[in-house]
Image: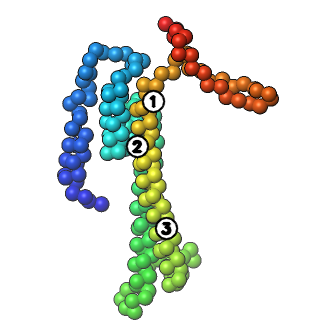
Amino acid sequence: MWFGGTRVTLACALALGSGCPSWGQSNGPTSSPGDLLPADSLALRVKRTTVAAALLPGSGQLMNGQWWKAPIVWGGLGYAAWSSATQAREMRASVDDLVALTDNDPATVPVLTDALGNPYSEADLESRAYFYRRNRDLSVLSFLVIHGLQVLDANTGAMLRSFDTDDRLSVGWSHHFGVPTVRLTLRPFQPSHP
């Protein structure tokens, strides 16, 4: 499907490029990857990652360093797009045959046949068209859901990237009166190991 590729490409480049000059620049002293970022820097990184993931699927996962998730995103979106195109093609063939069968024109003949080589009846073609329309709609919906989930994953990954997970934060399993429990402990004043 053509959407005026030059305009869409230009719009995406402008949207991504508006913040690009500062993506690789630091606003202060260089910090190690383990250091916590200031709140404004964190918010800016989360925003950029989310926008990038919304415009170019999989890019948010790459920006977060979760490179292994990008092929999963691309595969899911590719399968959903292929499925919707296949379902739409089959639906169109069923509708075309239904029109050819009911137009009372001897020059148009249906081309679809069942497994035995017999042409489909009008009721079968109508049922087949509804079946493929439903599957096409579900495929489009799955494409949108996968896209939304990958944007959410990129946003969450960007926010949790600076989450402190040193030895002062611990989770433990225990039994309290014979019932399994989960214990979350934060020791804010315990010095971390060097």
Furthest residue in direction front, as rendered: 189
Callout 2 crowding tier (Cα within 10 Å): few <14, some 14–19, many ≥20: many
Color scheme of the displayed model: rainbow
In the image, residue 143 above or below residue 95: above
**Kind of residue at disc 3:** Arg
- Name the foreground residue: 87 vs 52: 52
The residue pinned by badge 1 equals 160
The residue pinned by badge 3 equals 134
The alpha-carbon separation of the residues under discs 2 and 3 comes to 26 Å
Q: Is mark 2 on a helix, strand or loop?
A: helix
Q: Give whichever of discs 2 and 3 has the lower sequence position.
A: 3
Instruction: Find residue 101 and report its image quarter.
Output: bottom left
Q: x, y (%) of residue 8?
A: 23, 51
Q: Give whichever of discs 1 and 2 has the lower sequence position.
A: 2
Please name the residue shown 22% across and 38% down the image: 17
Query: Of the numbered discs in the image, which one, if any, rests on residue 151?
Result: 2
Please name the residue shown 40% across and 72% down the image: 92
**Kind of residue at disc 1:** Leu
Q: x, y (%) of residue 99?
A: 40, 83
Query: Of the numbered discs in the image, which one, if any, rests on residue 65?
Result: none
- Name the foreground residue: 56 vs 89: 56
The alpha-carbon separation of the residues under discs 1 and 2 comes to 14 Å
**Kind of residue at disc 2:** Val
Q: Are marks 1 and 2 in contact (CB under 8 Å)?
A: no
Q: Quadrant of the N terminus?
A: bottom left
Please name the residue shown 37% across and 86% down the image: 108
Q: x, y (%) of residue 89?
A: 41, 67
One can see residue 106 in this view:
no
Callout 3 crowding tier (Cα within 10 Å): few <14, some 14–19, many ≥20: some
Instruction: Find residue 65 and report its image quarter.
Output: top left
